[in-house]
Image: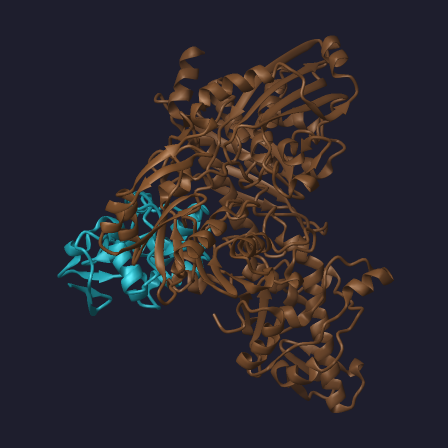
Chain colours: A brown, B cyan
Amino acid sequence: MSGIFNVSRREFLKTGALVGGGLILGANIDWAGAAEEGTKKSYAVEPNSFVHIAPDDTVTIIVNHSEMGQGVYTSLPMLVNEELEADWKKVRFESAPVAAVYNHTAFGMQMTGGSTSVWSEYDRLREVGAAARQMLIAAAAAAWKVDKKTCRAQKGKVVHTSGKFFTYGQLAEKAAALPVPKDVKLKKASAFKLIGRPTARLDSPEKVNGAAKFGLDVFLPGMLIAVVERPPVFGGKVKSVDAEKAKAVRGVKDVVRVPSGVAVLATDFWQAKAGRDALRIEWEEGPTAGLSTPGMKEQYAKLSKTPGKVAKKAGDVKEGLASAAKAISAEYNVPYLAHAAMEPLNCTVDLRPDSCEIWVGTQFQTVDRNAAAEIAGLKPEQVKIHTMFLGGGFGRRANPASDFVSEAVHVAKAAKTPVQVIWTREDDTKGGYYRPFWYDSISAGLDKTGKPVAWSHTIIGQSIVAGTFFEKVLVKNGIDNTSVEGAADIPYAIPNLLVDLHTTSIGVPVLWWRSVGHSHTAFVVESFLDELAHVATKDPFEFRKGLLAKHPRHFGVLTLAAEKAGWSRPLPKGRGRGIAVHESFGSYVAEVAEVSVNKEGELRVHRVVCAVDCGQTVNPETIAAQMESAVVYGLSAALHGAITIKNGMVEQGNFDDYPILRLNEMPKVEVHIVKSREKPGGIGEPAVPPIAPAVANALFNVAGIRLRELPMKPEVVLAAMKKK
Amino acid sequence: MISLEINGKQHSVDVEPDVPLLWVIREHLKLTGTKFGCGIGLCGSCTVHVDGKAERSCQIPVADARGKKITTIEGLPEDHPVKLAWIKEQVPQCGYCQSGQIMQAAALLAVDKNPSDEKIVNTMEGNLCRCGTYPYIKLAIKSAAGKGEKS
């Protein structure tokens, strides 16, 4: 990383110029002021903060979203360069420091999440590129004393009609002295050269030769490694600690108390861990010590019999159910899930009296910076965050409570030394912030023709945002939108609808987990809809189609997936097919799964056909990869994933008891992208929700058993087969 | 002091003999391409070559690595067919597990120039990828073996 990596904006301008030897384009533009004049922009177009052109024509694009596998270090530079017209071979990327100019255009803080990176930057970064290009053209025209209209930008050069040209590197300095144009004209989609074209990732080479730097790969002079013993029960507190033996371990330098537990600091990880093993801590377990998964399930089941807060109401459900020719009801539940990113949580902190520097893989720069400042007693601008490559995020590295960053700052503050806090895999799995455990009670009625006339869905679970600063934005009339998303807004034409919610307080830390509420609601809604189709004696695909007349994009992907999967063609004996469709994060995904099940109850997913409508595509290569990735992530949860609690303690710790999908279980995944000029939607998450119901529906199709609980472990499948 | 041969170079490190090779490679030699994922040999992120064989460096006490030739991702030539295939087929997403995947695949191709699908699956199933790059991994191994065609 060069010196322009992570300095304050002021310094950034200064250092960038020094390091590059060239110039950063442009001056500040007051878009806030411009907004008042009627342009209504919620973001700043400051080419100087996003584009740096060096004399050797290298173009560095500063990326304000975190790279965690989804390819933003390529797709966001593509947006800039579509308009900038630099030579793509000369384009590099660099991760942005923390500054207001890098705030998310929709959320007003610097962050990555909700499958928003591309659509939220789609306009701004193209405008940045266009503004920079116009300034380069103006600089060339001025130097030649010709009309700007006689100059055009082409592959890193400004070319005059006479054939003479300047390279961008030659123009950067002059262009920088010019004002940033206030009204930039963007290309029509039909003129795109880069957007929509499969493009190799810019970060592949360093991710292949071991050079890519993740949070764990940071070493500071004099840095100690810390591991923290945290309470075995959530909310527990240290009663007493005997650190004598820990301190005697070779290499152990210090043992300090922090709010989250007891940290052992040593010259290296192994010694720190050995020191931690030698600690003797007496814990005060707190109110969640009696918690257990079966008990929770019972409690939730009881709650489901009582009305909750109304999230969605249409028509009269009671009346609808009473008048139905047939009515069915069912109870579903899904477990807590850990994110289990391959890179265990970690954070490196260098805390000084007047500064705090942090190296971390985070999705939540502004939140983490502010939390660090508060702990350190500094101003936010005195805290610098270096966003490293994230060895997976999936939501775990976007914590409003800033747990792993705050803790590391506490350790650095207590131990008065540069420190890297490393979580073991077990720490990471047991450390909380799970996808919530959900319980659902759901009923529906069909009329004589088999058309659904009523749908009543009661949801029970914890709110992800309760008690955080997101509560104000995301909780309305007592309903956390992330608890009911995908359930309160089902696309199917059902005249009488009721969705209600019980929000519980359990004391287990919960958080967004790839696709957030949708990972739960899609499983329940799409499974139960399949149950309804069966009762109506209709084909599950045709049944859905008949209810989606007003939702053409759902209809489109559903039809495409079915067609590509050969829905109407018979399968070999022993194979079953299931279908599901779901919208999330502005994109529409349908999946058809083909499965078989053996005598041991082991499910095998052979093939998944996936159709996606994510609007205008930016990098189709990344889209296909993200769809497959999300299918794998969702399958891990559907087949294996469960965090369970006994006596307040998490029972799982590593990949032996919290398995994730391996290569030998990998189905063939076929991705089909709908051609569209609609506004871009998200792509990192939307393929997760449909996979669990598609597989559950396929299991029903092949074996006649309906699983209403995840994961679909062999013993559960076997028990259901025996019961049948 | 323990003497080690890593990527063709001799190193001498002052560590306890029971420290796993992984942490010596990372913290003492600063070869950070080798990753910590699980610490119990279940994920393969820490895979290195020990005398040419793919091994989990988190499971090898450093003392047992004495007298052996260790190769890490940094020691695999930049033009190694597996590294080139990994770029050609655009395998990495977050990238964290990929050093281990590449070392595992390189060791496979060193002994089997033309592995069957079954052999690829059996060899690679011990290397976890949470981003789910498995189809690309298969493709890249076939590509490196000189029979890769995009499906």
Question: Does B4 sit left or right of A257 as displayed?
Answer: left
Q: Is residue A217 visible?
A: yes
Q: Residue at x 56, y 69 (%)?
A: A7
Q: In this orientation, which residue lies closer to the viewer: A512 or B49?
A: A512
Q: Closest to the observer: A614 or B19?
A: B19
Residue A158 location, x and y as percent?
68, 81
Q: Nearer the viewer, residue A40 or A250?
A: A250
Give the quarter of the image for residue A501.
top right
Tell whether A369 sits left or right of A496. left
Residue A713 on image: x %, y %:
41, 26
Residue A706 shows up from this direction: no
Q: Which quarter shows the C terminus of chain A? A: top left
Q: Position of residue A723 (x, y in %)?
A: 43, 11
- Vertical comparison of A156 with A624: above or below: below
Quadrant of the rendered image containing residue B30: bottom left
From this view, report whether residue A74 is shown above or below residue A259: below
The part of the image, by quadrant, that contains residue A474 is top right
Q: Nearer the viewer, residue A534 or B25?
A: B25
Q: Residue at x 43, y 56 (%)?
A: A412
Left-right relation of A285 to A170? left
Residue located farthest toward the left when viewing the structure as drawn = B67
Q: Residue at x 62, y 24 (%)?
A: A459
Where residue B108 appears, as percent x and y from the top left, is: 27, 53
| Residue A404 as seen in the image, left or right of residue A72 | left
Q: Is residue A690 above or below residue A360?
A: above
Q: What residue lies at 56% left-to-right and 64% top-to-bottom?
A: A382
Report how many numbered discs are placed on residues in the image.
0
